[in-house]
Image (cartoon, rainbow, N blue to C red):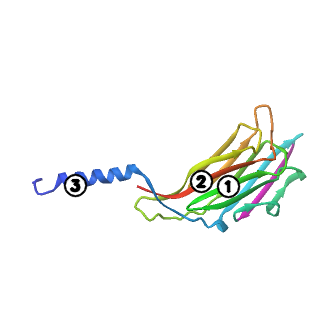
């Protein structure tokens, strides 16, 4: 009854498919539409019981003073600008720059990249890969978190154990690639 089916050949095909599923190789790069990038930064600080918040928001590859959305209680510092640049062949550079040496309790920057919804290969997806920090003299806190994935990039800074952190007037420079991951 089972002699009519080519089981050894099917087992070889199934093993090959399993090998492809486990391999996960990058196939091609995707040029991001930088004009569709959404960026948002939020800086929070509490001074003498008064909450301060500075929010910047933009649609496009840069945040600067023209993108200021809210400044509670006239916090004088917290100018942090972002710039996203295409380096070619699916590589990009994100620069987070502090323009002052103000203090804060918390800061986060969200860069929402518009990746394709579908991949060209079966069980494939688009992802942010090969994240590399080239420079980091943005702030004096060891509590910096950088995460990247299919939704974009998030940079978060939290206060030190002894209190707030200080911006250093420097920058965080990160490079990354956007690739189609195929299985």
Q: Which residues are magenta?
A: 50-59
Magenta stretch, main secondary structure, is: strand
Tags 2 and 1 in contact by the CB under 8 Å rule?
yes
Check disc 1: other Cα within 10 Å, few if <14, some if 14-19, many if 20+: many
Question: Mark 2 to mark 3: distance in Å?
Answer: 40 Å
Callout 2–callout 3 Cβ contact below 8 Å: no
Q: In the drawing, does residue 13 fall left or right of residue 57?
A: left
Q: Which residue is under mark 3?
A: 10
Q: Residue 144 appears at what percent x and percent y?
A: 69, 41
Residue 11 on the magenta segment? no
SS class, disc 2 = strand
Give the mark count: 3
Q: Residues within 10 Å of mark 2 (few under 14, many from 20)?
A: some
Q: Which residue is mark 2?
A: 176
In the image, residue 58 lies in the stretch drawn in magenta: yes
Label 2 or label 3, whichever comes before in sequence order: 3
Q: Which structural element holds mark 1?
A: strand
| Residue 62 picture location, percent across and down | 73, 61
């Amino acid at each position: 009854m089972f002699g009519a089916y080519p089981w050894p050949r099917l087992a070889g095909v199934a093993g090959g498919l399993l090998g492809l599923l486990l391999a996960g190789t990058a196939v091609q790069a995707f040029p991001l539409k930088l004009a569709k990038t959404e960026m948002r930064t939020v800086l929070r600080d509490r001074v003498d019981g008064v909450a301060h918040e500075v929010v910047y928001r933009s649609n496009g590859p840069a945040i600067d003073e023209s993108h200021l959305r809210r400044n509670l209680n006239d916090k004088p510092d917290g100018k942090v600008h972002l710039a996203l640049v295409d380096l070619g062949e699916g590589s990009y550079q994100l620069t987070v720059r502090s323009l002052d040496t103000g203090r804060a309790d918390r800061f986060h920057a969200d860069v929402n990249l518009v990746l394709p919804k579908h991949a060209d290969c079966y069980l494939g997806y688009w992802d942010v890969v090969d994240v590399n920090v080239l420079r980091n003299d943005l702030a004096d806190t060891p509590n910096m978190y950088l995460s990247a994935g299919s939704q974009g990039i998030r940079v978060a800074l939290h206060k030190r154990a002894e209190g707030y952190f200080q911006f250093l007037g420097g920058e965080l420079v990160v490079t990354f690639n956007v690739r189609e991951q195929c299985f």
